[in-house]
Amino acid sequence: MSWLEEFYIRISHLRDERTQIGRIVSAHPAEGERYYLRVLLNHVTGATSFQDLRTVNGIVYSTFHEAAERRGLIESDNTINECLDEAKVFHMPSSLRRLFSTILVFCEPSNVHGLWDRHMEAMTEDYRLTQMCPHAVEQMALLDIKNMLESMGKDISSFPLPEIDKSYDALDNEAREIIKESTIEVDPEHLGFSSFLNPEQRYAYDEILATINSGQGGVFFVDGPGGTGKTYLYKALLAKVRAEGKIAVATATSGVAASILPGGRTAHSRFKIPLNTEDGGVCSFTKQSGTAKLLMRASLIIWDEASMTKRQAVEALDNSMRDIMARPDLPFGGKTIVFGGDFRQVLPIVRKGTRSQIIDATLRKSYLWENMRQLRLVRNMRAQSDPWFVDYLLRVGNGTEDTMDADYIRLPDEICVPYTSDATDIDKLIESVFQMTLEENLLDPNYMTPRAILSTRNEYVDKINMKMIERFPGEEMIYYSFDHAEDDPHNYYPAEFLNSLTHNGLPPHILKLRINFPIIFLCNIDPASGLCNGTRLIVRGFMRNAIDAEIVLG
């Protein structure tokens, strides 16, 4: 008998001995209780009767629909109201207004005015302490919500809320963006950064300031590997320019990088760059808009991580700037603009693009590149204690590290966790990164949040996270996603199939959390407040429809 025949015999014996349900008969949502029974059967383990399925937290509900709703398996008509009610336990009124604004933008509630009427009292509690007139209280809260919506790229007039009285809105729409940028507070610590710049940073700092002071304008690209102090330089420049009463606009390609810069916004939201830009494109703002007036007044514009963005986005800003400044012959209309990044790291994303297509999408292939003065930062300030690792990263980034089969590099043994094909390999990896056997480490956010495990696929990340949550102490809360396919009247895509998909930018279908557990944001919701893709938070509390988390990194 060959080894292959023996293998098949063993497999067949295993199959014969196992008793299992291959698949539960499908049901359409229109079938009512039958459908909700199927939802419960797919999620509730160990149930021995229909009554068990209808029991949630010791309460027996009369229908499967109610039980599924209370378990959070299906969306309730009252979910948003319950979320705001629960958030009142955790949040101050200002945070409630921000949550309300976020719900308007991302949840598309059907009864906005009803939400406002029901929760206005809780959202205006702080203003009622200082304002005697109910109308004034309402107007102050609406103005606050208006500003929050604008930071998310929306206008309050798009929502059926009470109108804002012009007598309370002292800033007209055209001047609002200028006023916001002009009133950004300058951190005294950042003002002192200029005294501690290394020679490379000092040269770049002086050259950029000289261009600003001359009024002639210029375009720069600050090129440096991670850790060479690009952000430190940007903060010094922003503080200097703003301290002189001038306007400095800070942007970045990603939300996390934007949140690090004082007054930072993502470049796409600040410049109104269309999601899909082609050669010769322009930004979406007009000459009469507040964005145009802001850019005309700006003395300095910074765009960090420009190496990650497609050249067409930068060229769209160039075309629009030449237009609003009425200086079509000068790059960016003669403004001083500083780009920064590292082409050794992440390049622009071109879906299913070839190597040549990806390279063609980079800023280096733009007609603007030859007009950019190159300012290079080489000295790594972040990893001075480990010069070997700095040199190793540079060799990899520059393509000079030895390769195997032309496409692979060998990682040094000292930075690898051995793989043995054993079931405990993941546990060993987690232990080497987090040292989770020490409970004091698990409860210390300063210890947990700087550490992370990256993987190439979402399904691997989910498996690691499940092991992490099992080893974490404390009470557990489980959240389920509500998944349905649009324009699918025949239910060709059942919920359990959609639940199994691990899409970029979305959490898993089953999200398990515990107090003090670190979590990470997967999308840009409100970069101005630090809520963007990559922001790390610590769970401080949770209820069925609301999570209280503290930003600790981002």
Image (tube, rainbow, N blue to C red):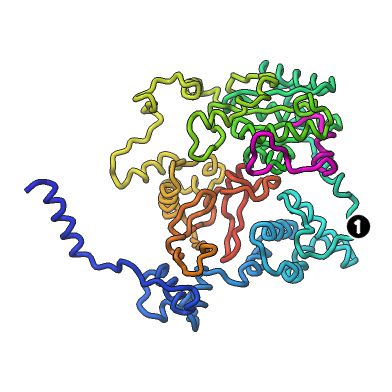
Query: Which of the 4 image quadrants contains residue 205?
Result: top right
- Residue at 49% in and 81% down: 63
Which x, y percent locates residue 509? 48, 59
Give the residues in magenta: 274-301
The one of 516 and 451 positioned closer to us in this rendering: 451
Q: Is residue 517 above or below residue 22?
A: above
The one of 333 and 462 positioned closer to us in this rendering: 333
Crowding near the residue tagged with mark 1, few <14, some 14–19, many ≥20 C-alpha atoms within 10 Å? few
Which x, y percent locates residue 7? 15, 51
* Residue ID for mark 1: 166
Q: Secondary structure at mark 1?
A: loop
Is residue 474 highlighted in magenta? no
- Residue at 68% in and 33% down: 314
Q: Residue furthest front?
A: 280
Amino acid bearing label 1: Lys
Residue 490 visible? The answer is yes
